[in-house]
C-alpha cells in the first residue's frame, strides 16, 4: 500500500478554504485556486525549496503547480485537478508544506 493520506476527497468552497487558512494569511484564496509567493536569496535556494515542496507533495499525494521566476521567486499554486476546484486535499497539502517549512 502506498504511503500518504487516505482521506476522501471533498469539495471546499473558497470561503471554507479561506477560513481553514485564516492563520496563514500568506496563502491567497482566489476563486478555485490557492497560491503563495516566496522569495529567496538566489536561484539555488529557490530550487532547494521547490525540491522540499515536491517531497511533501509526494507524501500527501497531491501535487501543486510550481513556478520559479525572475531568478529567486517561487509561486506555489494549488487546486484540485480532479474536481476542477478546491478540495480538502488542498488544505492538507498547504498545512503539510507549512509544517515542512517549520512554521
Image (tube, rainbow, N blue to C red):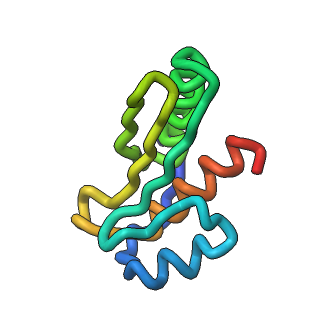
Q: Residue at left 47%, top 36%? A: 74
Residue 29 found in image quarter: bottom left
On screen, residue 56 versus residue 99, left or right, reads left
Number of numbered discs: 0
Q: Residue furthest top?
A: 44
Is there any visible trace of residue 87 in the rendered image?
Answer: yes
- In the displayed structure, 57 sits above or below 80; it is above
- In the displayed structure, 26 sits above or below 40; it is below
Q: Position of residue 24 (x, y in %)?
A: 64, 65
- In the displayed structure, 50 sits above or below 34; it is above
Q: Residue at left 49%, top 33%? A: 73
Q: Position of residue 14 (x, y in %)?
A: 40, 78
- In the displayed structure, 80 sits above or below 54; it is below
Q: Position of residue 76 (x, y in %)?
A: 44, 45
Q: Nearer the viewer, residue 74 or 81?
A: 74
Q: Nearer the viewer, residue 84 or 31?
A: 31
Amino acid at each position: 500500500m502506498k504511503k500518504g493520506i487516505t482521506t476522501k476527497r471533498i469539495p471546499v468552497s473558497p470561503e471554507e478554504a479561506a477560513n481553514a487558512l485564516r492563520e496563514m494569511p500568506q496563502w491567497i484564496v482566489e476563486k478555485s485556486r490557492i497560491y503563495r509567493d516566496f522569495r529567496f536569496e538566489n536561484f539555488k535556494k529557490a530550487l532547494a525549496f521547490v525540491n522540499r515542496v515536491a517531497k511533501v507533495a509526494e507524501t500527501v499525494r497531491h501535487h501543486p503547480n510550481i513556478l520559479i521566476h525572475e531568478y529567486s521567486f517561487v509561486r506555489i499554486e494549488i487546486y484540485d485537478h480532479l474536481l476542477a476546484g478546491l478540495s480538502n486535499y488542498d488544505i492538507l497539502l498547504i498545512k503539510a508544506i507549512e509544517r515542512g517549512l517549520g512554521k
